[in-house]
Image (spheres, rainbow, N blue to C red):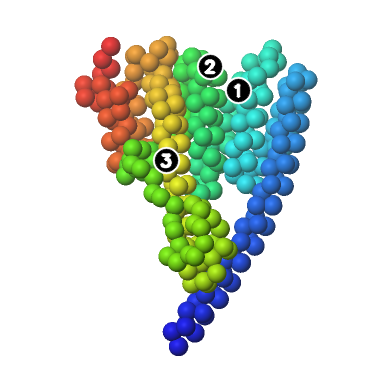
Amino acid sequence: MIKKHRLINFIICISVSFICLTSKASDDQNYELQRQELLMDMNNVKTISLSGDLDKLERISNEMEKKWSVKDKELYGYMMLQVCGRFTSYNFRDNRQYELARQYAILALEKSNKLQENSKIPIKAELKLVTGYILSLYNFKEESLRENWPSKRSSISKLYFQSWNRMENAIDLSFDPNKPLPPWPKPSKFDGIWIPGMLPESIKDPVVRAEYQEALDKFRDRMEWDSNQRRLRRLEKIFIPKIQGQILQLYSGPVFDSKNLETEALKQDIEKYVKDEKIKFLIETSTTFSDIFLTGWCLCE
């Protein structure tokens, strides 16, 4: 009876695994086809940008944004980096090129921010868009003199705080980069020569094979998590200081020297856009912002 029960469980396990593998293979194939299509479209955008025709580049960028925004969001993020990059990599002798880069960056960020985490554009693409194509390419000195500037600045700062918030939420504080990685799992019973990472198919016993497959899947998930946490910390070191600096610059108009801060406006927007108390604490105690908060919102020079 016990053997029959184990056999039934094994058959169910194999059936589910087969379905999952078939589905994954199909998904991988579809993704590869989309990736190849993306590369061709990106090359077309590049070719048009090199022609020096800004109007034509704007038209194809609009087409590509609409086309890829409804596809895989990872690929959409790469396309929008290409679009924004092409507007700024060639001298069209027209300042409108920088405004267009900013508009497409904001459009991609706003669309992504409306989605669940697993459907957003890659976090690296988001950080590149928010730090590379919004503040640094825009003539805020003129905008800051207009009546609607506080509202416009607030909507722009929202993108910075959302990216910062996303970055901090993705980082698992329990991760210890100095902790040794776990060893490769071993099958509980195996007559042959065990090789780390060997395929489960080499194990004859169906129960042992299923157990080993489960352990191997957990190990791979653990390794992926470890790799992702290391990658996130590298991104944090590169991009968070840029985000912090650009936020300070944004709230130091009309000179934008990051010294004469409109601290009350900055405080209000942090309260408005940063809802997570943990993230708010990280922002307020960060090296860039701590002096502001500790001195009653007066920047110490």
Q: Position of residue 135 (x, y in %)?
A: 50, 22
Q: How many circles with numbers are drawn on the protein? A: 3
Instruction: Look at label 2 and name its amino acid.
Output: Asn
Instruction: Look at label 3 and name its amino acid.
Output: Gln
Q: How far apart are the alpha carbons under marks 1 and 2?
A: 9 Å
Q: How far apart are the alpha carbons under marks 2 and 3?
A: 36 Å
Q: How far apart are the alpha carbons under marks 1 and 3?
A: 35 Å
Q: Position of residue 60 (x, y in %)?
A: 74, 32
Give residue 139's mark.
2
Upstream in sequence: badge 1 or badge 3: 1
Upstream in sequence: badge 2 or badge 3: 2
Identified at 55% across, 76% down, the residue is 11
Identified at 59% across, 38% down, the residue is 77
Q: Nearer the viewer, mark 2 or mark 3?
A: 3
**Badge 1 is on which residue?**
99
| Within-10-Å neighbours for mark 2: few <14, some 14–19, many 20+ | few
